[in-house]
Image (tube, rainbow, N blue to C red):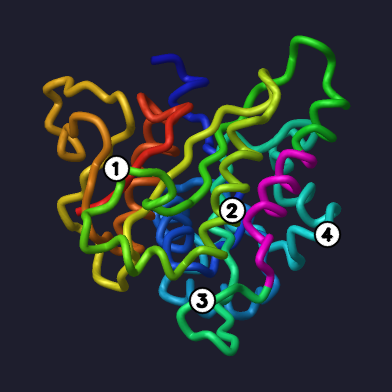
């Protein structure tokens, strides 16, 4: 391994870092020495969530105050600290809306029913702006991982889970649109992974995570359950989603999961 590769500092941009999944990935990334940026509306809240990390570790974190509706803040989050003309190598988005209940408690909506779609559009728009300033042929595609949910297509849910997920029509419509935005990005702009998590819990990380996607063939590795096809299950902790994102997106540069909609469950 060359010295340049051995000493490379990985740079990661986080959107929605105060949510459990992205927060868990952020903590692991910072702990491993990654140089991270994080866009949040509440910087003080994020600092509080990371209060157990050492001051030295937190030196690798740049917090940008704002939302995905603020183009300048999105761009600042995406920019590489080493070379601001380019984006950070990895981008993780855990942005989601806050549930909002109306007259029908069985049809919850969100404070912003389009927030996931808008986040995907804002990130891609920022990348296009950065790419427009780079000489042709020199653009380095970042790897974007977005956190979505299982149950958006047939075959991803155990039968008993279907009534519960049927209640989440509006939030799921937003996830579907976000996935469409990301997977529909023009060729050469960005590599992507959609992480479709099962029903999220607050349990600790360290569970037996299974990961799979439509058409996957077992390879004998035994890793992440070595699932044949889609991984079907009930739940997964936010900590384990974050662990998978850290180990596979950042640690393995996406591996076999690039360009896939990956179901993550126990």
Q: Which of marks 3 and 4 is nearer the N terminus?
A: 4
Residue that label 3 marks: 107
Say if the magenta span includes residue 241. Answer: no
| C-beta proximity under 8 Å, tags 3 and 1 | no
Residue 228 placement, left or right of 259:
left
Q: Residue at x 51, y 63 (%)?
A: 169
Residue that label 2 marks: 14
- Against 205, residue 229 (above or below) is above
Q: Nearer the viewer, mark 1 or mark 2?
A: 1
Indicate the position of residue 193 as horizontal and vertical percent values: 48, 36
Q: Which of marks 1 and 2 is nearer the N terminus?
A: 2
Residue 7 placement, left or right of 266:
right
Residue that label 4 marks: 70
The 10 Å Cα crowd at callout 3, few under 14, some 14 to 19, many 20 or more, is some
Q: Earlier in the sequence, mark 3 or mark 1?
A: 3
Name of the residue lying farthest toward the top: 137
| In the foreground, 198 or 37 | 198
| In the foreground, 148 or 163 | 163
> Does dot 4 land on a helix, a strand or a loop?
loop
* Measured Cα–Cα span from mark 3 to mark 1: 23 Å
The 10 Å Cα crowd at callout 1, few under 14, some 14 to 19, many 20 or more, is few
């Amino acid at each position: 391994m060359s010295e340049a590769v051995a000493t490379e500092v990985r740079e990661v941009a986080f959107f929605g870092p105060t949510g459990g999944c992205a927060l868990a990935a952020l903590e692991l990334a910072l702990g491993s020495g990654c140089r991270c940026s994080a866009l949040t509306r509440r910087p003080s809240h994020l600092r509080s969530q990371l209060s157990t990390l050492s001051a030295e570790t937190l030196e690798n974190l740049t917090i940008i105050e704002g939302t995905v509706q603020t183009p300048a803040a999105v761009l600042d989050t995406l920019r590489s600290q080493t070379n601001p003309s380019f984006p950070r190598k990895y981008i993780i988005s855990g942005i989601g809306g806050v549930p909002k209940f109306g007259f029908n408690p069985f049809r919850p909506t969100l404070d912003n029913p389009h927030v996931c779609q808008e986040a995907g559009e804002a990130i891609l728009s920022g990348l296009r702006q950065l790419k427009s300033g780079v000489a042709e042929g020199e653009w380095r595609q970042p790897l974007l991982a977005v956190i979505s949910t299982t149950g958006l297509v047939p075959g991803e849910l155990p039968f008993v889970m279907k009534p519960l997920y049927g209640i989440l029509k509006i939030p799921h419509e937003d996830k579907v649109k976000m996935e469409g935005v990301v997977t529909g990005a023009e060729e050469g702009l960005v590599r992507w992974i959609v992480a479709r998590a099962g029903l999220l819990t607050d349990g600790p990380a360290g569970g037996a995570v299974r990961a799979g996607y439509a058409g996957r063939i077992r390879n004998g590795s035994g890793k992440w359950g070595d699932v044949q096809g889609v991984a079907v299950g009930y739940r997964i902790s936010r900590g384990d989603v974050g662990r998978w994102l850290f180990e596979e997106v950042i640690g393995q540069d996406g591996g076999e999961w690039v360009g896939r909609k990956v179901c993550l469950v126990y």
